[in-house]
Amino acid sequence: LDSLAPPLRRVVEAVCLAEEGLEAVERMQAWPARSGKLALKMALAQLAARAARS
C-alpha cells in the first residue's frame, strides 16, 4: 500500500481493511458521489500492476 498516493491508500484501507462502504468514504473525503468507486478501481489496478511486476 505504501506505493499508492495517500488518497488512494485511504480508500483501499477504508473499504478493504476497515470494511467501510464507498458512500461513507466519499462523505469522509468530501468526494462527489460515485467517485469512491473510481478511486478504488484505480488503486486496485495500481496494486495489481505492481504485483505483476514483482
Image (tube, rainbow, N blue to C red):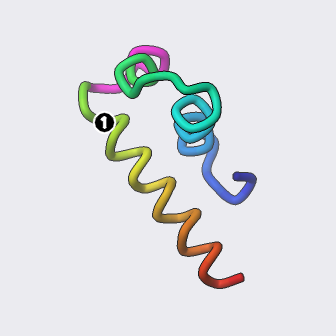
Residue at x 52%, y 33% (from the top left corner): 15
Instruction: Give the extent of the magenta segment.
Output: 27-32
- Name the residue carrying label 1: 35
How crowded pointer 1 is (Cα within 10 Å; few <14, some 14-19, many 20+) is rated as some
Give x and y (percent) for residue 48: 54, 69
Give x and y (percent) for residue 41: 39, 53
Which amino acid type is marked by label 1? Ser
Give x and y (percent) for residue 36: 37, 35
User: Does residue 39 appear left or right of residue 18 in this picture?
Assistant: left
Query: In which quadrant of the rendered image does the C terminus lie?
Result: bottom right
Give x and y (percent) for residue 51: 64, 74
Residue at x 39%, y 28% (from the top left corner): 22
Q: Quadrant of residue 17?
A: top right
Residue at x 54%, y 44% (from the top left corner): 8
Label 1 SS? helix
Q: Is residue 10 magenta?
A: no
